[in-house]
Amino acid sequence: MKKEHDSLSARATKGFSVAASPFNPIKRDLGVILLVGVLLLLLSGHLGLRGGGELWLLFTYGVVAAVWLAWHTRQRLHALERERGEGRDGAE
């Protein structure tokens, strides 16, 4: 109990910190994709696109962004599974 209290008090004096997530690069990609999507939406009227062209552009961008995020997430999950698998093999 004392050891647990010591570790909590030591953390409290160092400040607030959060462990890094293995999905931080994907979160960054999502942020960039959202910003570019909003800019594309705002600029699509200035590009001279009318009705269907604007819709097609935004739809295509959304599909490409979704595929990119899904692929990148799956790659990261597979890498994490490989790391965990190697950790178990080395511990035995």
Image (spheres, grey):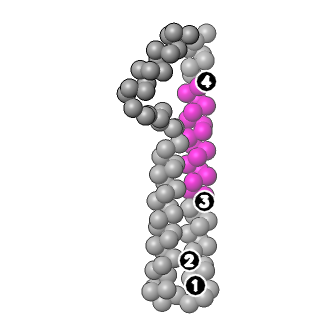
Find the distance from the CA under tag 2 to the CA under tag 3: 14 Å
Measured in 3D between alpha carbons, the distance from the residue under mark 4 to the one under mark 3, in whole angstroms, is 28 Å
Look at label 3 and name its amino acid.
Answer: Ala
Which structural element holds mark 1? Answer: helix
- Secondary structure under the numbered disc 4 in the rendered image: helix
Write the residue at 59% across / 50% down.
71
| Residue ID for mark 1 | 53
Inter-mark Cα distance, 1 to 2: 6 Å
Under tag 2, what secondary structure?
helix
Q: Disc 1 vs disc 2: Cβ atoms closer than 8 Å?
A: yes
Label 3, residues with CA under 10 Å away: few <14, some 14-19, many ≥20: some
5 w.r.t. 41: above or below: above
Q: What is the crowding at mark 4: few (fewer than 14 residues within 10 Å), some, or many (at least 20)?
A: few
- Boundaries of the magenta span: 67-85
**Mark 1 neighbour class, 10 Å CA radius: few under 14, some 14 to 19, many 20 or more:** few
Label ID, residue 66: 3
Q: Nearer the viewer, residue 8 or 86?
A: 8
Q: Quadrant of the N terminus?
A: top right
**Quadrant, the C terminus:** top right
Say which element carries label 3.
Answer: helix
- What's under tag 4, amino acid-wise? Gly
Residue 60 at x, y percent in the picture: 59, 71
Which residue is labeled 4 in the image? 85
Magenta region includes residue 84: yes
Q: Which residue position is annotated with label 2?
A: 57
Residue at image location 43% in from the left, 34% down from the top: 16
CA gap, disc 4 and disc 1: 48 Å
Counting the numbered discs, the total is 4
Contact between marks 4 and 3 (CB within 8 A): the answer is: no
